[in-house]
Each structure stands twice: as structure tokens, then as C-alpha cells.
Amino acid sequence: MNCKKCHTKAVIGLPRHNAAFCKVCFNEFVHDQVARAIKAERMFGPQDRILVAVSGGKDSLALWDVLLKLGYKADALYVDLGISGYSATSREKAVRFADTVGAAHKATLLTHTVQEAEGAGIRELADLIHRPTCSACGTIKRYQFNRAAVEHHYDVMATGHNLDDEAARLLGNVLHWQEEYLDKQSPSLPASVEGFAKKVKPLYRLSEREIAAYAVLNRIDYIVEECPMAKGSKMLLYKEVLNRLETESPGAKQSFYWGFLDKQAKAQPASASMTEKDQASLHPCSTCGQPTTAEICSYCKMMARASAAKSS
Ligand code: AMP
Ligand code: FES
Ligand code: ZN
């Protein structure tokens, strides 16, 4: 198998593109897919300051790596959730990457430690409020990502969600006809109101397998294990189903998700009015000041319930 571009020995085959690449040409392909995503979705420009949420996993570290190599001003944020046997290792991977590749590009890593800020790790907090760990974790991460981006004046917040993540999420939303979530499933969400950072997903054109290959070929040291809380999750099931489809018909994931994005773009007036509706109902949380549609935001409600449960 030879590289489609330079005809030397290929290191990876990409059935969905009917192509194979050597390391150099594959790196170019990955950089080009990210550059296309940034342009197509008007994510950010060369002068913007980007905050990348890094989990220590392959996707977010690869994203940070690509953005720095493309010349963007990108710092990163790691949220330590206090999951024993997992958080310490993932933190170590994020810090090591920051100390090497990050430092070489004068980029810095911010950290937020849930245990320090809230007096308990994510498992204990979730137990206190009787919520599944992953759902409490999602609320905390979304809140902390936004808070850090706004407080430190970043223009945009980037996450490492890839094509597999977005296709699996789309499948879940379609299976349950969650139209409200479908409207918001975009790789680029604008900073709708003061206090809400713009959020982007520059890896949406790349599959999990392609990003894993990029990380390995570029010697990015990442945490291989999934979060132990994710075992048996619906998302993993949807990913498995989509992988089976992909094996049978290469390109299935891409046509499912990109097809959805095309339809969404054509229906722009409808989704734009949804955003305006959302904007009109947002105001500052009476506890923390972050935008919310309720009196108190879901993060502050969650923390209030946890501290009430702790002291009872
Ligand atoms: P996940 O929800 O675990 O699939 O992660 C999706 C994206 O969220 C990752 O690619 C990261 O950009 C970001 N992320 C997840 N966990 C963390 C974390 N603990 N700290 C910072 N960013 C994270
Ligand atoms: Fe949030 Fe696993 S990363 S519970
Ligand atoms: Zn709040």
C-alpha cells in the first residue's frame, strides 16, 4: 500500500477517503482537515486567543498539538475531577504535554481541581445529589470550561470532540427525537450573550481512529484508558453500532453527520430564531453571575444540593 500523494510506503489506509498516506502526508491531511473545519465553520482567526479543554486523552492533546503547529495562540485547561486511579494519570499526561510541546510554543496550561474548589471529587458530589456521575461531571465541565474562558478573556473555547463523538451524539438525539439538542449540535456555537464563551469542535471532520493514528505517529503520550465511569454508557453503544456500519460501508459516519450539518445550514433561519429565543431568556445566575435561563444556574444548584446533603 503506497501513499496516495507521494507514493512512498503508506503507514495508514483511510477507506472512507479511498486513500492511504505516509506519515508526512497523513500529518498534512490531519492539519488540512482541521484548517478546513476552522474555515468552514468560521471558528476563529489567527489573532484569536483559544482555550483548548484537554483531558489527557488523545483527541484533546492532538487538537492542542495541531492548533499550535498551525500557528494559533492556544492555551489549555485541564479539569481534575478527582476520580481515583484515573484523574492522576490523565493530569500527568496533560502536564507533561504542556511542559514539552506547549512550552516550546509558549503556551500554558490552566488547571481546575474539583476536590479543592468543592471539597469533594466528582464521584462523591454525584452520590450526594443522587445523580449519575457522568451527568454531574458534564455539568461541572461545561461550567468550568466556560468560566475559565470568560474569566481569562479567551475568544473561544475548543474541545476535542471528533467525528465519532458527534455522529454518536447525533444518533442518540435522533433515536429519542431530542429536537432541542439537535438544534444545538453544531461544531461552532457562537458566544450568544455576555458571559457565554464561543465553543468550537475543530476535530469534527476526523474520526477517532485517524486521531489515534496522529497521536501515535507524533509520539503524543496520552491516557489510553477511558474514564471508568463511562463503561456501559449509551454513547459507547452508539459508537459500536456506527463502527459496524462504517466497516460495512466506509464513509457512513461522515455522511450521517456531515449530511446533518448540511441540512442544518440550509434550515438556518429556523435554528437562528431558536438561538434568539434562548438569548432572550438568559440572564445572570443570582449566585455566580454566569448566564442561565433559571434564577440559579444548574452548577450552583448542584453545589448547593451537595453541600446541604453533606451537612445533613
Ligand atoms: P468527553 O466528554 O470525555 O468525550 O470529552 C470531550 C472533550 O471534552 C475532550 O476532547 C476535551 O476537549 C474535553 N474534556 C473532557 N474531559 C476533560 C477534563 N477533565 N478537562 C479538560 N477538558 C476535558
Ligand atoms: Fe466525567 Fe468520566 S469524565 S465521569
Ligand atoms: Zn451559578
Image (cartoon, rainbow, N blue to C red):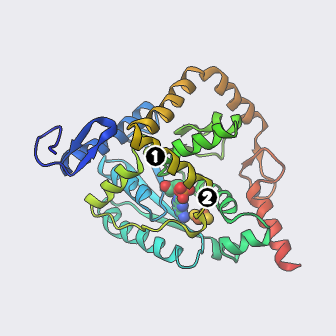
Q: Residue at x 59, y 38 (%)?
A: 185
Toward the right, the furthest residue is 312
Please give the label number shown on residue 244: 1
Neighbour class for label 2 at 10 Å: few (<14), some, many (≥20)? few
On the image, the x and y values in percent for residue 56 come to 45, 65
Toward the front, the furthest residue is 248
Would residue 158 be visible to someone looking at this image? no
Neighbour class for label 1 at 10 Å: few (<14), some, many (≥20)? few
Please give the label number shown on residue 87: none
Which residue does the numbered mark 2 point to in the structure image? 233
Q: Quadrant of the C terminus?
A: bottom right
Closer mark to the observer between disc 2 and disc 1: 1
On the image, the x and y values in percent for residue 7 come to 11, 41
The amino acid type of the residue labelled 2 equals: Ser
**Does the Cβ of the disc 2 residue fall within 8 Å of ligand 2?**
no
- Residue 286 vertical position relative to residue 4 in the rendered view, above or below: below
Q: Residue at x 40, y 33 (%)?
A: 39
Q: Residue at x 45, y 47 (%)?
A: 243
On the image, the x and y values in percent for residue 300 come to 77, 60
- Residue 112 vertical position relative to residue 204 in the rendered view, above or below: below
Q: Quadrant of ligand 2?
A: bottom right
Q: Quadrant of residue 306?
A: bottom right
Q: Secondary structure at mark 2?
A: loop
The CA span between labels 2 and 1 is: 17 Å
The amino acid type of the residue labelled 1 equals: Arg
On the image, the x and y values in percent for residue 281 come to 78, 37
Q: Secondary structure at mark 1?
A: helix
